[in-house]
Image (tube, rainbow, N blue to C red):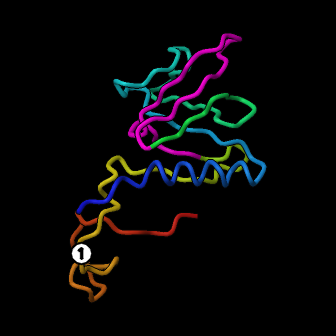
Amino acid sequence: MDMVPSRPYLMRALHEWIIDSGHTPHLLIDADHPELEVPDSARKDGQVVLNVSPSAVRDLVMDNEWVSFVARFAGVSRGVSVPVAAVKAIYARENGRGMVFPDEDGLSQAEPGADAGSRDGNGDDDDPGRPRLRVVK
C-alpha cells in the first residue's frame, strides 16, 4: 500500500518548530499553481512568499491538502488558499533554516526491502534516476 505524502506533515512540524524557536515562518509557493488563491500583488517572479506566523495570520489551517488562512494585504483582509502541492519550502525568515520540498513527493517512497542507500542493499548505487538522501546544512 502506498504511503500518504509526507509534505503536509513536515510542513506542520517545521511550522511549529520555527514558532517554538521564536522565529517567523514563511512559505515559498509556486505562483503558477492553478488552484492558488492569493492576491496578485503577492506574486513576484513566479513565486509567492507568505508570512504564516500567528501574529500575521488568523484562522490558519494546515491540513493534508490545503493551507488556508486570513491575512492583510495592503491593509485589506483577504482569504488565502494554498494547495499543499504548491508549497516549495517552509523556512524561518531570520536565519533561513527550514526545508525545501522536492517537485514530486514520490521521492520519499522507497522500494520494499531495499536499504535507503541502494537497490541491492550493498551501499553502491550507480542509478542516477534513483532518489538519495543527503544532509543539508
**Quarter-wise, where is residue 126 in the image?**
bottom left
**Image location of residue 84, percent across then percent down:** 43, 39
Q: Amino acid at mark 1?
A: Pro
Q: Which residues are magenta?
A: 64-90
Say which of 42 and 38 sits in front.
38
Point 22% across, 78% down: residue: 119
Q: Name the residue rendered at 56%, 45% in the picture.
A: 90
In the rendering, at what x and y percent does residue 128 appear?
24, 66
Residue at 29% x, 55% y is: 106
Counting labels gives: 1
Residue tagged by mark 1?
A: 112
Query: Is 89 colored magenta in this rendering?
Result: yes
Classify residue 51 as left or right of residue 121.
right
Give the x, y percent position of residue 66.
45, 35
Question: Which of 70 and 25 lies nearest the eye of the viewer?
Answer: 70
Residue 82, placed above or below residue 114: above
SS at circle 1: loop
Q: Is residue 79 left or right of residue 72?
A: left
Q: Is residue 90 above or below residue 39?
A: below
| Residue 83 pos. (x, y %) | 42, 33
